[in-house]
């Protein structure tokens, strides 16, 4: 019993990677399935965080700080992306009173 | 011997002024603009003077100051390497002094003349640009650098001729100047290329040792030096307004008067003369047919332009033809081998011709822009400074002793008279006698041209400044002397026109003077020749030289006398009568020998017709009707296909991105595995070494399985990539080898015996 608990508590690389995949999957699912632009943006954040977690897990596992540096960069890019994305969503909402991405198709052929 | 000196400063100061004036001048106001423009040129003039003093005091005859314009190589193309540098020797010293100081005077003059001009900053920006380009032309140490300046002054000239581009006439004149110059520049450029191809150098410093190479026979039996000289001269004829490319200069008077004075009289148009003197080694190539051509064209131009000048009514047109004519004199100078005389005349001419133009500007300023001399008259009372300075310039250009023009023109005439052209020895007697007579013919043409010069200049003087005013009452009430910013340069140039000639007095006039005086009076000749340019030819007998001098003086006096007879105190009845009785001749001269009309029929109209054909047939029908339909046709097809993807469904875009990313990952791992099975085999007795993969692969990127003996079972598995695999066979024989590479990322597997996209790896090893 003691042994089992210890094994479960000893979190290894695989646990992180599985969590990352779960995050990435939820995010991808959200991007594909949801129609609300805001939700899509949030899902993209999840995807990015899934990627980040992978980076950090490997960085820890390989004792290589470059992974962490890259993760910081991803966070910065994600912040910028969120700012611009939200601004666009707000702009779109002011014009169309709607953020359903299926209806934002003025530029289709 | 050379010495370093920051010569690039001389160029950069005016160019900096141009940049400042063109970018900021409009905002910062006219005071700022004139301050920047004048101080930039003044700075250049001071640095140049310092440099010239160094050349004069520290360096031997052939010594030069040098500077780098571009660090390292300027142009590199294969074996062709060219450095851009500047050099100041005794010849360019003359030019630099003339250009910087006269430019400064004219900049100062222009601050007064252009006072009411709304585009003040643009004008001074261009003027600075011109000065910078002209200094590059003069200071360049090789023909290509000179060519950069050459094109730069062409551009500045074009911009300034068309300065008042709102009037169509002015813009057209600018274009004409530019196009005619392009024709010349084309010859110039070919000349430079030919020189480089045949001789292998374009640097002036190397010219002293290229004479032998220039003798290489090239085309039609003439040595290559002859052709290079002719091609360079085509460029010089364009820039310096010689037959047949002189037509742009009279039209160039459409520009503001200070421009006419600086660019189209004193400096830019003399560039051709400078280049001929610079490249005298090329022009001296035996047999001296190139020099005969240069001198002949020069004499013809001098005579033709001088005769046209006699009848013109526009103040600046007369001066323009006078410039063309005087440039012809200079070309006769350099063409007859009297290089020092040609350059000397260039210098003195810069003084009095700049002065004449500035005087013209001063008069037209008072007349409210009117340029027709028939409507002037009696202006002497109203503008005494302009009148008396103009009087001095007229004496100088007519060649009255001791004014500047006398000595330089006399040097050219004497040089032409005494010249001997060295031609091939196997000429027929009549050919030889023609060559011997040629210099006398040149002299005769020049003497006639000098007569015309004296006549038309004094006609101008008498008609404008003496007699009664013939313009309107309103114009008369506005007559006034110009502001001091304009009269000051006039006075300075007048002083120059008196004194400049005194440094080039012929040797026979200075005999018996104290040594220091003799040194001063013959300063110019000893400054240039014989080391910089060959010594000018001179008649052997002293009486002949005196006689020629006396003759020249008499000719000038006759010209002035005739002008006084016909025009003193206004246009006389006699002049009108003469005009009527010589109606045909007058018409011919008044219409400038119909040269513009002839060019129009022979060149301009055919060219227009061809252009029209190209436009209406080739462009409108062939290109617009046919060729332009081809591209859009394919664009339409692909567009029709591609537009289906742009359906506005964001999620589908995202799926496309994801699928694409996955595709790229898949493709790259496929390629990695494929690379991994490429290799080569080395057999050493029974040891076989298999070199696999690519040098860029990292250890462990691929995992191999190898079957060494072809039995279908892998002998080794899980071998990490380390580029070399070894195996030793137990017995001799031929073995089939199969390698399998696996990329662990996607588990992509490639085998070397795959039928599709297999490997060039040898699949069997034969061991002994």
Image (cartoon, rainbow, N blue to C red):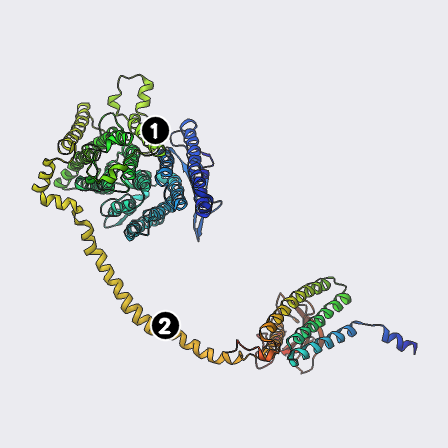
Percent of width and height locating residue B600: 21, 55
Instruction: Find disc 2 in the rendering and name its residue.
Output: B628
Q: Is residue B728 visible?
A: no
Q: Height in image: B19 above or below B631?
A: above
- Picture quarter containing residue B54? top left
- Picture quarter containing residue B106? top left
Instruction: Find disc 1 in the rendering and name its residue.
Output: B527
**In the foreground, B352 or B374:** B374
Q: Do the residues labelled 2 and 1 touch (CB within 8 Å)?
A: no
Q: Going 74% across and 68% down the picture, which residue do you hit?
A: A58
Mark 1 falls within which chain? B
**In the foreground, B287 or B128:** B128
Helix, strand or loop for disc 1? helix
Percent of width and height locating residue B147: 36, 46
Mark 2 falls within which chain? B
In this rendering, the label closer to the viewer, 2 or 1:
2
Q: Residue furthest left?
A: B581
Percent of width and height locating residue A87: 62, 68
Name the image quarter holding the C terminus of chain B. Answer: bottom right
Q: Height in image: B528 above or below B427?
A: above
| Label located before the other in sequence (2 or 1) | 1
- Picture quarter containing residue B369? top left
Q: Can residue B10 be seen in this view?
A: yes
Locate residue B72 relative to residue B345 in the image: left or right: right
């Amino acid at each position: 019993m003691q042994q089992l608990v210890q094994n479960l508590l000893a979190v290894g690389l695989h646990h992180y990677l599985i969590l990352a995949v779960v995050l990435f999957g939820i995010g991808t699912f959200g991007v594909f399935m949801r129609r609300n632009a805001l939700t899509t943006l949030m899902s993209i954040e999840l995807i990015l965080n899934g990627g980040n977690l992978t980076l950090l897990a490997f960085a820890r596992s390989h004792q290589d700080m470059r992974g962490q540096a890259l993760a910081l960069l991803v966070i910065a890019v994600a912040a910028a992306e969120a700012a611009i994305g939200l601004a666009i969503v707000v702009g779109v909402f002011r014009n169309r009173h709607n953020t359903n991405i299926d209806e934002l198709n003025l530029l289709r052929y | 011997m050379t010495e370093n000196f920051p010569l690039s400063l001389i160029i950069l100061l005016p160019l900096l002024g141009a940049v400042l004036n063109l970018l900021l001048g409009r905002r910062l106001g006219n005071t700022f603009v004139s301050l920047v423009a004048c101080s930039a040129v003044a700075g250049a003039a001071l640095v140049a003077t310092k440099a010239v003093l160094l050349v004069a005091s520290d360096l031997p005859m052939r010594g030069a100051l040098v500077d780098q314009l571009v660090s390292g190589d300027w142009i590199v193309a294969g074996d062709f390497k060219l450095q851009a540098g500047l050099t100041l020797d005794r010849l360019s010293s003359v030019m630099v002094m003339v250009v910087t100081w006269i430019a400064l005077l004219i900049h100062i003059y222009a601050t007064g003349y252009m006072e009411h001009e709304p585009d003040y900053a643009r004008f001074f920006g261009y003027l600075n640009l011109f000065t910078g380009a002209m200094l590059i032309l003069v200071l360049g140490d090789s023909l290509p650098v000179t060519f950069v300046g050459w094109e730069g002054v062409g551009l500045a000239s074009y911009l300034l001729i068309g300065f008042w581009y709102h009037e169509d006439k002015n813009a057209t004149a600018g274009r004409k100047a530019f196009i005619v110059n392009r024709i010349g520049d084309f010859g110039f450029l070919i000349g430079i290329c030919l020189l480089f191809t045949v001789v292998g150098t374009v640097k002036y410093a190397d010219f002293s040792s290229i004479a032998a190479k220039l003798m290489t026979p090239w085309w039609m039996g003439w040595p290559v030096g002859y052709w290079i000289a002719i091609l360079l001269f085509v460029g010089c004829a364009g820039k310096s307004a010689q037959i047949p490319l002189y037509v742009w200069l009279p039209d160039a008077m459409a520009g503001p008067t200070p421009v006419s004075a600086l660019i189209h009289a004193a400096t830019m148009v003399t560039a051709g003369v400078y280049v001929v003197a610079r490249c005298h080694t090329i022009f001296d190539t035996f047999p001296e047919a190139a020099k005969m051509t240069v001198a002949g064209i020069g004499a013809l131009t001098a005579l033709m332009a001088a005769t046209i000048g006699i009848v013109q009514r526009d103040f600046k047109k007369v001066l323009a033809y006078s410039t063309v004519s005087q440039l012809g004199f200079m070309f006769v100078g350099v063409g007859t081998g009297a290089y020092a005389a040609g350059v000397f005349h260039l210098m003195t001419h810069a003084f009095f011709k700049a002065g004449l133009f500035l005087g013209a500007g001063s008069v037209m300023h008072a007349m409210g822009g009117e340029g027709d001399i028939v409507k002037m008259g009696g202006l002497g009372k109203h503008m005494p400074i302009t009148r008396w300075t103009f009087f001095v310039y007229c004496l100088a250009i007519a060649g009255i002793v001791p004014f500047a023009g006398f000595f330089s023109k006399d040097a050219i005439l004497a040089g032409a008279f005494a010249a001997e052209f060295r031609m091939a020895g196997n000429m027929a007697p009549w050919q030889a006698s023609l060559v011997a007579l040629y210099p006398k013919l040149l002299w005769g043409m020049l003497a006639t041209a000098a007569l015309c010069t004296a006549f038309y200049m004094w006609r101008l003087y008498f008609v404008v400044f003496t007699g009664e005013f013939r313009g309107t009452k309103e114009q008369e009430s506005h007559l006034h002397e110009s502001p001091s910013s304009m009269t000051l340069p006039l006075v300075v140039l007048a002083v120059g026109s008196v004194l400049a000639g005194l440094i080039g007095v012929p040797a026979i006039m200075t005999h018996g003077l104290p040594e220091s005086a003799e040194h001063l009076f013959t300063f110019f000749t000893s400054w240039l020749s014989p080391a910089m340019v060959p010594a000018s030819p001179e008649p052997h007998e002293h009486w002949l030289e005196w006689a020629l001098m006396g003759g020249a003086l008499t000719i000038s006096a006759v010209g002035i006398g005739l002008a006084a007879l016909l025009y003193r105190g206004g246009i006389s009845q006699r002049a009108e009568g003469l005009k009527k009785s010589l109606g045909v001749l007058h018409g011919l001269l008044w219409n400038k020998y119909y040269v513009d009309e002839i060019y129009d029929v022979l060149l301009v109209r055919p060219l227009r017709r061809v252009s029209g054909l190209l436009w209406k047939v080739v462009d409108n029908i062939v290109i617009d009707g046919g060729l332009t339909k081809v591209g859009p046709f394919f664009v339409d097809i692909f567009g029709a296909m591609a537009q289906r993807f742009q359906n506005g469904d964001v999620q589908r875009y995202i799926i496309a991105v994801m699928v694409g990313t996955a595709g790229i990952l898949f493709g790259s791992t496929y390629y990695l595995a494929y690379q991994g099975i490429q290799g080569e085999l080395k057999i050493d007795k029974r040891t076989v070494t298999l070199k696999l993969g690519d040098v860029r692969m990292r250890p462990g990127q691929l995992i191999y399985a190898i079957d060494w003996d072809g039995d279908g079972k892998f002998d080794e598995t899980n071998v990490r990539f380390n580029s070399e695999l070894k195996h030793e066979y137990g017995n001799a024989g031929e073995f089939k080898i199969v390698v399998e590479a696996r990329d662990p990322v996607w588990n992509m597997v490639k085998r070397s015996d795959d039928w599709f996209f297999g490997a060039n790896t040898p699949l069997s090893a034969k061991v002994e």
